[in-house]
Image: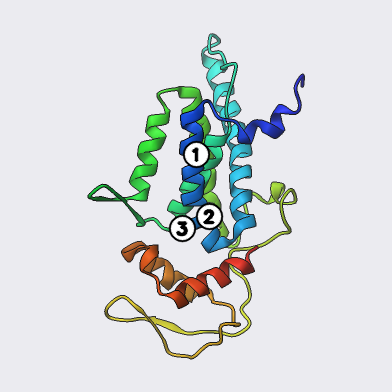
């Protein structure tokens, strides 16, 4: 390895100014959503681990391709910031599959926007493969994490101690869906009690159908409390 420090700066490199602006905006939007649900440390971990797994996926794909076509050459430069962003985008899609983003007068589901961006990145095949690898990681990581299986565990010691998206609750809180789609509680709870998975799932459903901005102050506080237990 001639330039070992490149592995440290790779996750923070951009191909140009406009890509930097896009990645900063995307990091704010999707990083905030992921942080609200699973905490800031976990969000940072998904970003960094997404870049790492994207690089593995990239070399694996090109390694297989070179077996059948020896003329394939790797590009001289690759930039890793976008890969981390795609990991966060698809982690958000796994959390909120029906979440909508308003673009001018249209409400478009995030999963369609994510797929469009992935296809668009294949204008440059090397970049597309890198982003696809991180997107697969971000999506599967959340899906498996919900079931208690952390596929990124080999890297987790680099950021934080082992944590799960599901944690033991100090006291159960029973919630049921109201007919109008709002949240009703059959048990009064103290703000000090940790929200359970059922409560968080109901809040996620409301975000998917009505948007984060339509959460009540109490719901946002409960979601924030849940995210802190995962930090």
> Residue at horizontal 37%, vertical 48%?
111
Where does the N terminus fall, quadrant-wise?
A: top right
Q: Specify which label sits upstream in the sequence, 1 or 2.
A: 1
Q: Are marks 3 and 1 in contact (CB under 8 Å)?
A: no
Q: Is residue 100 above or below residue 201?
A: above
Residue 160 picture location, percent across and down: 72, 56
Q: Secondary structure at mark 1?
A: helix
Q: Secondary structure at mark 2?
A: helix
Label 3 to label 1: alpha-carbon separation = 20 Å
Label 1 to label 2: alpha-carbon separation = 21 Å
Label 2 to label 3: alpha-carbon separation = 7 Å
Where does the C terminus fall, quadrant-wise?
A: bottom right
> Within the image, what quadrant is residue 124 found in?
top left
Any part of residue 139 in sight = no
Residue 74 picture location, percent across and down: 57, 17
Q: Secondary structure at mark 3?
A: helix
Any part of residue 174 in sight = yes
Q: Specify which label sits upstream in the sequence, 3 or 1.
A: 1
**In the rendered image, which residue does mark 2 sit on?**
142
Q: Are marks 1 and 2 in contact (CB under 8 Å)?
A: no
Q: Residues within 10 Å of mark 1 (few under 14, many from 20)?
A: some
Q: Are marks 2 and 3 in contact (CB under 8 Å)?
A: yes
> Within the image, what quadrant is residue 192 found in?
bottom right
**In the rendered image, which residue does mark 1 sit on?**
23
Q: Residues within 10 Å of mark 3 (few under 14, many from 20)?
A: many
Side of 50 where 178 appears, left or right = left
For the residue pair 148 and 169, the one nearer the viewer reads as 169
**In the rendered image, which residue does mark 3 sit on?**
95
Side of 117 where 200 appears, left or right = right
């Amino acid at each position: 390895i001639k330039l070992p420090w490149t592995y440290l700066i790779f996750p923070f490199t951009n191909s140009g100014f406009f890509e930097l602006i896009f990645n900063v905006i995307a990091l704010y939007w999707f990083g905030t959503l992921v942080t609200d649900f699973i905490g800031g440390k976990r969000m940072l971990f998904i970003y960094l681990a997404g870049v790492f797994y994207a690089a593995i996926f990239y070399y694996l794909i090109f390694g297989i391709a070179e077996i059948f076509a020896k003329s394939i050459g790797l590009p001289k430069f690759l930039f890793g910031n976008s890969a981390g962003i795609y990991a966060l985008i698809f982690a958000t899609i796994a959390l909120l599959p029906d979440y909508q983003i308003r673009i001018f007068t249209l409400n478009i589901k995030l999963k369609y926007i994510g797929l469009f961006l992935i296809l668009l990145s294949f204008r440059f095949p090397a970049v597309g493969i890198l982003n696809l690898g991180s997107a697969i990681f971000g999506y599967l990581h959340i899906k498996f994490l919900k079931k208690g299986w952390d596929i990124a565990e080999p890297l987790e010691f680099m950021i934080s101690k082992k944590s799960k998206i599901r944690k033991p609750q100090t006291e159960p809180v029973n919630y049921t869906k109201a007919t109008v789609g709002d949240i009703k509680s059959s048990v009064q709870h103290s703000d000090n009690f940790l929200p359970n998975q059922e409560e968080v799932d109901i809040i996620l459903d409301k975000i998917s159908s009505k948007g984060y901005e339509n959460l009540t102050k109490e719901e946002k506080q409960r979601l924030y409390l849940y995210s802190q237990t995962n930090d």
